[in-house]
Image: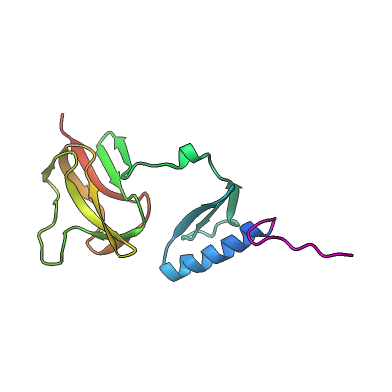
Amino acid sequence: MAKRHRQAGSGEGAPVELARKLGVLLTELGLSEIDVTVGDVRVRLHRGGAPSAAPVFAPAPAAASVERPAVASAESAAGVTIEAPMVGTFYRASSPTADPYVSEGDVVKEGQILCIIEAMKLMNEIESKVAGRVVRIFVENAHPVEFGQPLFLIDPAR
């Protein structure tokens, strides 16, 4: 009987192998969640307080639904939440000796720089998507942030 060799990254075992590799990466980077899409396979791993079920394997969403704006904004009754567009390190100022870009209570303009997120040695400026007053800053300076994590709450100017 002839043996069949599967191409690397294909077949039924590929999602399991990907989940194992991502689990190692999750631990090495100290992340609590990771969500990766490779081809038509989506793997999401979550580590938290309550034990969860096995990794979630699902078909990847259509490409159009994967695209996201540079900074996601979610409107609520209290204001607009500016979320982290990537995983990285949050910095409130351009350097350790510089004043923060914004503080709670400051009035900001649309497009004004709120903070920097360092990701893979690149400094990414995060801009406000609305004009208004900074109500709350959710992250401490030089702390890690995850994709989609709330950074700022802004009360929009009316």
Q: From what the image shows, is residue 5 above or below residue 150?
A: below
Which residue is at a point 19% across and 38% down the rendered structure image?
Answer: 155
Front-most of 91 and 5?
5
At which x and y percent is residue 92?
A: 19, 57
**Taking 88 as reference, is 140 left or right?**
left
Q: Position of residue 40 (x, y in %)?
A: 59, 47
Quadrant placement of the N terminus: bottom right
Residue at the image point whose x is 23% and y is 56% from the top: 116
Position of 99 with respect to 120 (left or right) is: left
The magenta stretch spans residue 3? yes
- Give the percent coordinates (x, y) of residue 94: 16, 60
In front: 10, or 155? 10
Quick one: which residue is furthest to the top in this view? 158
Q: Which residues are magenta?
A: 1-12
Residue located farthest toward the bottom when viewing the structure as drawn: 28
Q: How is the image coloured?
A: rainbow
Q: Is residue 133 left or right of residue 71?
A: left
Residue 20 in picture, x, y percent from top left = 58, 65
Q: In front: 133, or 71?
A: 71
